[in-house]
Amino acid sequence: MTPCLPSIAVIGGTGALGTGLATRFAAAGYPTIIGSREAAKAEAAAAAIAATVTGLDNAAAARAGDVVILTVPFASHSATLAAIRAAVAGKIVVDTTVPLVPPKVATVQLPPEGSAAVAAQRLLGDGVRVVSAFHNVAAQKLRTGSPIDCDVLVCGNDRAACEQVIALARAIGLRGIDAGPLANSVAAEALTSVLIGINRRYKVEGAGIRITGSFGAAAE
């Protein structure tokens, strides 16, 4: 008997990263829900991916998902978290947010809390298991469905939650690396600005990262 896969709710799923992740999870067989501030916009984005993908407003999507992935711009981070806080109690929330502050998005600019993920944990409370991941994966590469030569740094204070997110990354063709506690998310978040600068200077299409060295089976 095939085990049931958890449903994945992508909040802010009409954006580039959200659409890319939703596309990958739907293709991997996960029940996938796209959330947006406007339900009609979410429904249109869902229909463009697959008939099996559902579109709802952000709060309804957060309630429907077993695992909730936040893919909103930093400017919308706090407001979106406040809107879904009641709906994500007891769940894993995967925060992909990078604190980019236009126009200097290639310059690292971290929030007072140290990182967006730490701010998310404070806003949502201890009853929510916040895990940070998917910061350094190019959205356009996720949408292609082709293999991606990029690792995913996964940070969180709940090891079981981190392991589940690593398994989700593996399911969509990426290698998740346990990068330690949630405070370490600052490294992945800051690295995104560095990669944006590299993309611009060297005209690279979606530079990513690979962690070198030998890993045991648990990390593969």
Image: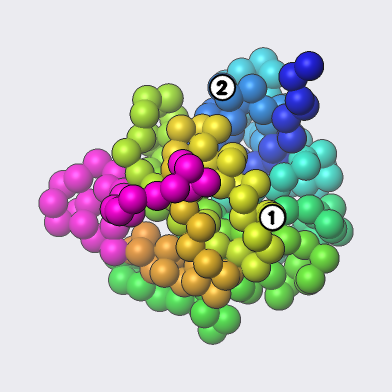
Q: Is residue 187 left or right of residue 70?
A: left
Residue nearest the viewer, comparing 119 with 188: 188
93 versus 158 height, above or below: above
Q: Is residue 140 left or right of residue 213?
A: right
What residue does disc 2 label? Answer: 27
Badge 1 amino acid:
Ala
73 versus 14 height, above or below: below
Mark 2 nearby-residue class (10 Å; few <14, some 14–19, many ≥20): some
The quadrant holding residue 77 is bottom right
The residue positioned 29% from the left and 44% from the top of the image is 206
Q: Can residue 80 be spotted in the picture?
A: no
Specify whether residue 23 is painted magenta.
no
First reached walking from the N terminus: tag 2 or tag 1: 2
Specify the quadrant that holds the N terminus.
top right
The quadrant holding residue 76 is bottom right
Q: Position of residue 163 (x, y in %)?
A: 62, 50
- Name the outermost residue toward the front: 216
What distance separates the C-alpha of mark 2 from that of mark 1?
A: 25 Å
Q: Position of residue 140 (x, y in %)?
A: 38, 36
Q: Position of residue 201 (x, y in %)?
A: 15, 56
99 versus 16 height, above or below: below
What residue does disc 1 label? Answer: 160
The residue positioned 16% from the left and 47% from the top of the image is 203
The quadrant holding residue 83 is bottom right
Residue nearest the viewer, comparing 21 with 180: 180
Badge 2 amino acid:
Ala
Q: Which residues are magenta?
A: 194-220
The residue positioned 56% from the left and 22% from the top of the image is 27
Q: Position of residue 98 (x, y in %)?
A: 48, 62
